[in-house]
């Protein structure tokens, strides 16, 4: 006769490692404790009629889907596609992008440009770029990073010690 998985027990022997939840004088414990806990949780929820409650709330004659598969093609699918297309975004930027994506799918979504204030539309003064070679000559000669033939950086000839 086979023993059901949830009834398997481990007996205490000398040298057998004991889980932290086992008391010092305890001679046996359930082998699959976490599986037992999950099973008992689900059994209690079903017994108390607290699992799948939305199925009982459906109107008479309306069939409610038992899975969330329709969501995969809807808003969840759009989120997955957005994240796939924008892989390099930091987490906070991706979160804001998903917020906008979901907002634009709402029933009364406004045009995003309606949220832009007049202060954001005013042009900011352009920055003036520094000259490309400003101060480089003085800096190079000061720190000794300018080109010099004396340090061996000139035109090299020969095979650099390699044999043919």
Image (tube, rainbow, N blue to C red):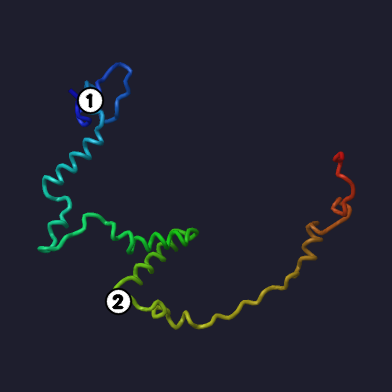
Q: Taking 64 as reference, is 111 left or right?
A: right
Q: Quick check: 92 above or below 130?
A: above
Name the residue at the top extreme: 14
Q: Residue at x 50, y 83 (%)?
A: 122
Front residue (pair 63, 158): 63
Q: Quick check: 44 above or below 104?
A: above
As helix, strand or loop, the secondary structure at mark 2 comes to loop
Q: Taking 32 as reference, is 76 left or right?
A: right
Q: Residue at x 34, y 67 (%)?
A: 102
Q: Residue at x 62, y 77 (%)?
A: 127
Q: Residues within 10 Å of mark 1 (few under 14, many from 20)?
A: some
Q: Taking 159 as reference, is 99 left or right?
A: left
What x and y, as percent, mark residue 60?
A: 10, 63
Marks 2/1: CA–CA distance: 59 Å
- Rendering quarter of residue 15: top left
All told, the count of numbered labels is 2
Question: Mark 2 or 1 closer to N-term?
Answer: 1
Q: Dividing the image into 4 quarters, which one contains the N terminus?
A: top left
As helix, strand or loop, the secondary structure at mark 1 comes to strand
Determine which of the numbered discs, if any, sits on residue 9 in the image: 1
What x and y, as percent, mark residue 48?
A: 11, 47
Q: Taking 93 as reference, is 77 left or right?
A: left
Name the residue carrying label 2.
Answer: 108
Front residue (pair 15, 129): 15
Q: Dividing the image into 4 quarters, which one contains the C terminus?
A: top right
Determine which of the numbered discs, if any, sits on residue 109 in the image: none
What x and y, as percent, mark residue 143?
A: 78, 57
Front residue (pair 78, 152): 78
């Amino acid at each position: 006769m086979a023993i059901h998985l949830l009834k398997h027990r481990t007996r205490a022997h000398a040298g057998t490692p004991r889980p932290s939840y086992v008391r010092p004088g305890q001679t046996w414990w359930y082998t699959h404790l976490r599986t037992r806990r999950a099973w008992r949780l689900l059994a209690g929820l079903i017994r108390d009629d607290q699992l799948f409650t939305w199925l009982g709330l459906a109107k008479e004659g309306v069939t409610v889907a038992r899975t969330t598969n329709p969501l995969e093609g809807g808003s969840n699918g759009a989120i997955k596609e957005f994240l796939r297309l924008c892989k390099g975004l930091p987490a906070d930027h991706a979160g804001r992008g998903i917020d906008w994506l979901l907002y634009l799918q709402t029933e009364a979504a406004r045009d995003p440009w309606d949220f832009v204030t007049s202060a954001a539309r005013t042009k900011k003064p352009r920055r003036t770029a520094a000259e490309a070679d400003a101060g480089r000559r003085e800096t190079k000669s000061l720190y000794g990073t300018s080109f010099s033939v004396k340090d061996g950086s000139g035109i090299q000839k020969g095979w650099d010690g390699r044999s043919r």
